[in-house]
Amino acid sequence: MENNLSLIVFTGIKKGETVVRNKMCDQIFFLLKGKIIFSYEYHVNNVLEEGTFVLFLSRYNYKIIAEEDSSVIIVSMRDETNFYSHFLLEILQNLTNNIVPENPAYPYPLKINETIFNFLDNLVKTISGGMSSKYFYGLKQKELLHYLWTYYSKKDLAIFCAPILNNDIQFAKKIYEKYESAKSIEELAALLNYSVSGFKKRFVKVFGIPPYNWMRKEKAKKIYYDINHTQKTLKEISNESGFSSMAHFNKFCKTMFGMSPSMLRRNI
């Protein structure tokens, strides 16, 4: 069952069923029952066990396959009130040096404790009873974040949220929202109302690498996902990725992956 606002979704996935989650907003994915396998970008066959939850990021596409009949609740972390950003900033401000490993595993699953389980159980009953108020869903989103803050260690929360914790969360969020619409650094800077020099300076401060290198890596991730997890033809992927010819597309893949796109698809 799915509420029409899609802020909170309670649904079932049958054994063997495949679900594709395209880039949306950050979502907390709770697996109440069953077992699922999910893949994204370069990462394949991640296992999510019953009674755990993970953070699905807006920057990625995901392919989800149910190993068993599964029940899930998905809470979308839309941030109209900046409450989600404040939650992340609180985690960031409470970190001490070395609390998070240099390359933390993502996604980092957490166990659904008794408090969260009871919260989700009541949520399912309320949604099943016909509740469909956007205000209600917003309150429940905030309530969930309060429970996470209270009942989980700051270290676990920091690793759980590590991919979106940085020294400028709002700037990074805008980058992920806009970068696919830009064909160049100049276009991306203009979309965010920056001069090119000012944009490059702030970008490096937040992401640690020049924007051109970052955009190239992000393009490679999307291409890898499309080749390995979709039924799109290589020509379609090349066109959608902005290449002027298949020759340029092949050259890009050989540079980034060490093989042609057709070989990459065969290997998988």
Image (spheres, rainbow, N blue to C red):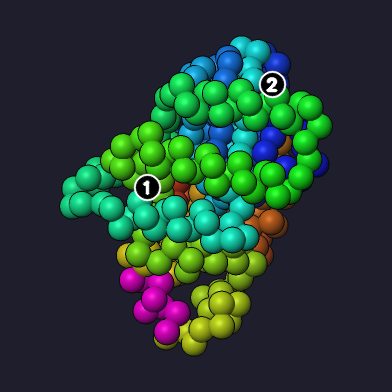
Lateral position of residue 183 relative to residue 55, left or right: right
Q: Name the image quarter holding the C terminus.
A: top right
Question: SS of the residue at dot 1?
Answer: helix
In the rendered image, residue 190, in percent from the top left (x then y), is placed at 58, 82
Q: Main secondary structure of the magenta part?
A: helix
Q: Is residue 18 above or below residue 99?
A: above
Residues in magenta?
198-205
Q: Is residue 203 magenta?
A: yes
Q: Amino acid at mark 1?
A: Ala
The picture quadrant where one finds residue 66 is top right
Q: What label does residue 13 carry, if any?
A: 2
The span from disc 2 to disc 1 (Cα, nearest Å) is 28 Å
Q: Is residue 158 above or below residue 245?
A: above
Disc 1 marks which residue? 162
Lateral position of residue 219 relative to residue 163, left or right: right
Q: Is residue 53 magenta?
A: no
Lateral position of residue 192 relative to residue 112, left or right: right
Residue at x 70%, y 16% (from the top left corner): 14
Number of other residues with Cα within 10 Å of mark 2, as a class: few under 14, some 14 to 19, many 20 or more:
many
Q: Name the image quarter holding the N terminus.
A: top right
Residue at x 51%, y 75% (from the top left corner): 185
